Image: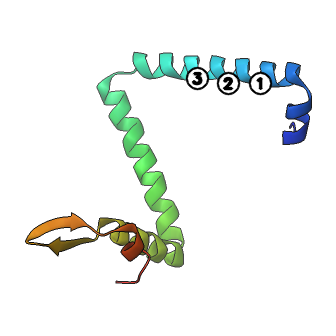
Amino acid sequence: MLEQDQLEQDPLERDMLERAMNLRAKFACRMRATRSAEQRLEQFAKLQQASLDVLLASPTGYQNFLCRNFSHRRVEVVDGEYQPVSSARRTQQP
């Protein structure tokens, strides 16, 4: 694997890497375009299940996930309207 300083020094390597990344992105785009809705939903379900399995494997990780998730969803009532909690207040514990 190329180090960051090697990529900065060798423009040919950087160009080859950019071409390879663009080719991979085009291939992935074509693959996504050819899948049916059922296939996309099936892939989504597999990814969701894998994510849940990872979370459930670590109780501490799951608790951290819940804290982050709930903190991002926090709302407050200002002048009778629900508004997202400001980023400054979001860092405070509920």
Q: Is residue 57 above or below residue 23?
A: below
Q: Is residue 84 visible?
A: yes
Answer few, some or many: residues within 10 Å of disc 2's Cα (few below 14, many 20 plus, some between 14 and 19): few
Quadrant for the N terminus, please. top right
Q: Is residue 25 left or right of residue 43?
A: right
Residue closest to the eye, 70 or 76? 76
Neighbour tally class for label 3: few under 14, some 14-19, many 20 plus, Cα within 10 Å: few
Residue where numbered disc 1 is placed? 17
- Label 3 secondary element: helix
Question: What residue is at 42 percent from the left and 70 percent from the top?
Answer: 68
Q: Quadrant of residue 92?
A: bottom left
Q: Which mark is residue 25?
A: 3
Q: Residue drawn at (34%, 71%), measured in percent from left and top? A: 70
- Give the colouring mode of the picture: rainbow
The type of residue carrying mark 1 is: Leu
Sequence-first tag of 3 and 1: 1
When the figure is inspected, residue 85 is found, relative to residue 47, above or below; the finding is below
Q: Quadrant of residue 21?
A: top right
Residue toward you, 62 or 19: 19
Q: Amino acid type of disc 2?
A: Met
Corner quadrant of residue 58: bottom right
**Residue at the disc numbered 2:** 21
Query: Amino acid type of disc 3?
Result: Ala
| Number of numbered discs overlaid on the protein picture | 3
Q: Residue furthest left?
A: 80
Residue 49 lies left or right of residue 5; in this view the side is left
The answer to the question of whether label 2 and label 1 lie on touching residues, with beta carbons closer than 8 A, is: yes
